[in-house]
Amino acid sequence: MSGPARDNPRSISPIFWLLFGAGGMVSALFGPALILITGLLAPTGTGIPESFLSYDHALAFARNPIGKLVLLAVIALFFWHGAERLFLTLKDMKAGPSLVLKLGTYGVAAAVTLATIGLLLAIGF
Amino acid sequence: MPDPAKRELRILRYQPGVDAAPAFGTFWVENAENLSVLEALQSIKDTLDGSLAFRWSCRMAVCGSCGMMINGAPKLACSTLLRDLPPGPVTVEPLNNFPIERDLVISVGGFVKKIESIYPYIIPKEPRTIAQGPYLQTPAQLAAYESFSDCINCMLCYAACPQFGENPDFIGPGAMALLQRYNGDSRDAGRQKRLDAIHGEDGVWSCTAVGICSEVCPKSVDPANAVNQNKTNSAFDFFLRFLRKE
Ligand code: SF4
Ligand code: FES
């Protein structure tokens, strides 16, 4: 039990919890609109210019520094949000040893974050 | 037609050291449509079996002693009326997630230790003499913590919480509500001590935001809200401690 009388080490959960919270906020604010625009409106050409999802457009967006930040935030934070929720669910289901579950959730989110940063830098400015 | 005046209660009985395992005992109570579950237990104790053990005191949802599982859900026996329960036998068991002391009486020692661990009293910002008069508070300052001060320590939220069921060391919803009652009080200066008491894995971070604690709370305390606020506070404290002068 936590308490003044006991040795009570600080948990590192706040790091994951804040990423989870930020991801929840970003996905709630932008997730549905993104699905609507990139998943439905753009592919069917409804109300959106035809060139919207063209390679040149997407590349220009990914080369813009602010565009890079937006892409990183959307991709990485979505993953961190999902990772935390999945980890807690799998832990409650006792689906496996904690380290395996952490690697399968937080590990994936970390790998995706690093890969995204790497790709965004490799694409150039 | 079953007689609404008579009701069957199946009560979990257990005397550690004497009984091999908990087992249900069946009792029929008279005049059932006018009784609370607590009154039914009292009538059983008075007329059928004097050895039945259960806790109660106020009979009016104020003292928090009479929490038990009624038809599988954590409830106050004094404010649960037999006539409001679905027809058929009523099962009565001790609160989930706690060791049984005897029959419907559970051990509260762990819970009391948790309450003690969060400094459940005002730690004044400055010492004040009697001549200086009472501390004053605006209605807004009162509103900041008042709902959390409604907690009656009934432990229904602990009986409902799956994380407390998994980890009996988890500080749990009720203690967090009490913590917020003091941390939210404008007269208090103990916030940092309390945040330090809950920053571990068994502190606020064992919660996975299930939220059932607030659903079962008989006093609408919303302990889940207290837990959430303190996740935020504890998370900021995690990073801000580097800027803090000790
Ligand atoms: S928060 Fe509600 S359910 Fe929990 S101990 Fe307090 S009054 Fe009971
Ligand atoms: S007897 Fe006091 S709350 Fe039920």
Image (tube, helix red, strand yellow):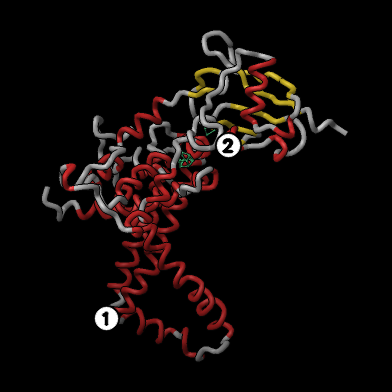
* Identity of the residue drawn at 51% across and 41% down: A93
Where is residue A116 shown, x and y percent of the image?
34, 67
B43 and A97: which is toward the camera:
B43
A62 w.r.t. B25: above or below: below
Where is residue A117 shown, x and y percent of the image?
30, 67
For disc 2, the marked residue is B75
**Residue A107 appears anywhere in the view:** no
Q: Chain of mark 2?
A: B
Taking B88 as reference, is B16 left or right? left
Q: Chain of mark 1?
A: A
* Identity of the residue drawn at 70% across and 34% down: B82
Taking B44 as reference, is A14 left or right? left
**Residue B151 appears anywhere in the view:** yes
Where is residue B201 shown, x and y percent of the image?
33, 40
For disc 1, the marked residue is A125
Number of other residues with Cα within 10 Å of mark 2, as a class: few under 14, some 14 to 19, many 20 or more: many
B168 and B107: which is toward the camera:
B107
Count of marks overlaid on the render: 2
B243 w.r.t. B118: above or below: below
Amino acid type at mark 1: Phe
